[in-house]
Image (cartoon, rainbow, N blue to C red):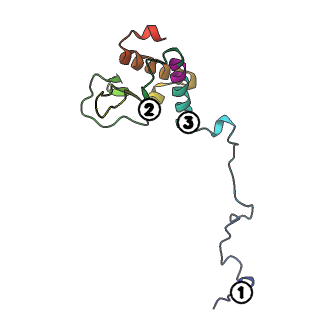
């Protein structure tokens, strides 16, 4: 029979919410949030996309005013991809959705697929270059100009 008084509990019968089983207390982050190691691959990838997009928007603010940029982990399962998809072999790297004017206006959208791009890069610098090249190609495709004019 257990006693209602917490002082008479047997050791180990209750869990302590404020300490782990070794009595050292709760563990926090091993690396402070301000250190780059605390950033996930997805956050680093998003930063690379944002850097390129901000650079392009400074130069082509009017042309890119309504364009949305998005990142998805993997491309959707489709049997056949249209010409709006930038592929490496059979694997999509990015997709341009041109948008639809009219009553239910849908803005143009460029979607980058993070995992296929990361898989093709050797290191972070290579990934930054690859992300930059893919965005440049998709924006050039959207604007109907040569990618060399954007780079």
Dot 3 surroundings within 10 Å: few (below 14), some, or many (20 or more)? Answer: few
Q: Position of residue 33 (x, y in %)?
A: 67, 41
The answer to which of 119 and 60 lies nearer the viewer is 60
Disc 3, SS: helix
- The stretch in magenta equals 52-57
* Above-or-below relation of 34 to 128: below
Q: Position of residue 7 (x, y in %)?
A: 75, 83
Contact? badges 2 and 1 (CB < 8 Å): no
Q: Secondary structure at mark 2?
A: strand
Identify the residue at horizontal 36%, vertical 34% (top origin): 75
Magenta portion: prevailing SS class: helix
Question: Does 126 lie within the magenta span?
Answer: no
Residue positioned most to the bottom: 1
Residue 115 drawn at (x, y percent): 44, 33
Q: Any mark on residue 70, and which? A: 2
Q: Position of residue 130 (x, y in %)?
A: 48, 21
Q: Is 43 left or right of 2, judged from the image as shown?
A: left
**Mark pair 3, 1: CA separation:** 50 Å
| Mark-to-mark CA distance, 2 and 1 | 57 Å
Answer few, some or many: residues within 10 Å of disc 2's Cα (few below 14, many 20 plus, some between 14 and 19).
some
Badge 1 element: loop
> What residue is pinned by disc 1?
5
**Residue with the mark numbered 3:** 43
């Amino acid at each position: 029979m257990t006693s209602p008084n917490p002082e008479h509990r047997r050791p180990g019968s209750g869990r302590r919410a404020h300490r782990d089983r070794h009595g050292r207390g709760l563990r926090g982050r091993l690396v402070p949030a301000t250190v780059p190691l605390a950033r996930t691959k997805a956050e680093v990838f998003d930063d690379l996309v944002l850097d390129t997009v901000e650079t392009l928007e400074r130069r082509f603010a009017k042309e890119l005013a309504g364009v949305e940029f998005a990142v998805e982990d993997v491309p959707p399962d489709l049997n056949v991809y249209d010409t709006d998809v930038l592929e490496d072999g059979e694997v999509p790297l990015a997709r341009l959705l041109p948008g639809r004017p009219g009553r239910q206006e849908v803005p143009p959208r460029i979607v980058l697929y993070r995992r296929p791009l990361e898989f093709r890069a050797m290191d972070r610098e290579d990934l930054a270059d690859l992300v930059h090249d893919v965005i440049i190609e998709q924006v050039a495709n959207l604007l109907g100009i040569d990618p060399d004019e954007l780079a």
